[in-house]
Image (tube, grey):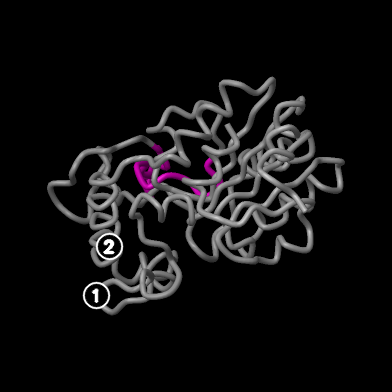
Amino acid sequence: MATIDSVRESIAGADSLVVLTGAGVSAESGVPTFRGTDGLWRKHNATELATPEAFEKDPLLVWEWYAWRRDLIRGVSPNPGHHAIVELEKRAKEFSLITQNVDGLHSMAGSINVVEMHGSIWKVRCTACGVESVDREVFGELPPRCACGGLLRPGVVWFGESLDADVIGKAFGAAKGASVMLVVGTSSVVQPAASLGAVARDAGAYVVEINIEETPMHGVADAHLTGRAGEVLPALL
């Protein structure tokens, strides 16, 4: 049975450390998840709003939801789990952070080598000219528009959309090159991120799951540490 000490020793001896994070890490900062009651907004299901079809049908409604989410995230801060990952990056010989979260809290905490698999809520992309930019400002009018006059959309990957090929390449490349991989606060059901632990394990990595509950990763990981990221990750330091 894995212990904090044994996992800490594995991390200390790793040539390459990779951390994969999911919604559970952000939830500890107060960011709602897509699951359970947190997935409802004005009685709308979040999984129905985060689609290309919803945006095409009612861009104002979708942007009102994202504006609400952006305002909410502005009011939260990185938690001890985020800060512990920053420290792990400083100590590692090689390090990659792969996140399914779009809130930018990892970068806010100070993480440098971050792969945002599902994009960022702070980015916008023009549906007309295709230009993508970072925009953390409060929008004066919704839905926002590009300088070219085109409609802007959130720079995130919606349900039914494909992930960027370069992003997938970076994520799976990091997983294949990992000596140790920590899978933290993710349900391990959303593909392709859910496959990264198995890819790392097949390539010879020591895979550790950190979660408050058992997930499909339980049958893949070499070790399991039960608890919140904000408690377990600092203990690994």
Q: Is residue 104 magenta?
A: no
Q: Nearer the viewer, residue 203 or 164?
A: 203
Q: Quadrant of residue 185?
A: bottom right
Give the residue pinned by disc 1: 42
Q: Is residue 77 left or right of residue 94?
A: left
Q: Is residue 130 magenta?
A: yes
Where residue 214 appears, x then y in whole percent? 64, 66
Say if mark 1 contacts mark 2, CB within 8 Å. yes
Residue at image x 36%, y 61%? 32
The residue positioned farthest toward the left in the image shown = 140
Give the amino acid at mark 1. Arg
Say the numbered circle drawn on residue 65: 2
Residue at image x 77%, y 25%? 15
Q: Nearer the viewer, residue 206 or 225?
A: 225
- In the rendered structure, which disc, 1 or 2, sits on the residue that comes first in sequence? 1
Magenta region, residue range: 116-132
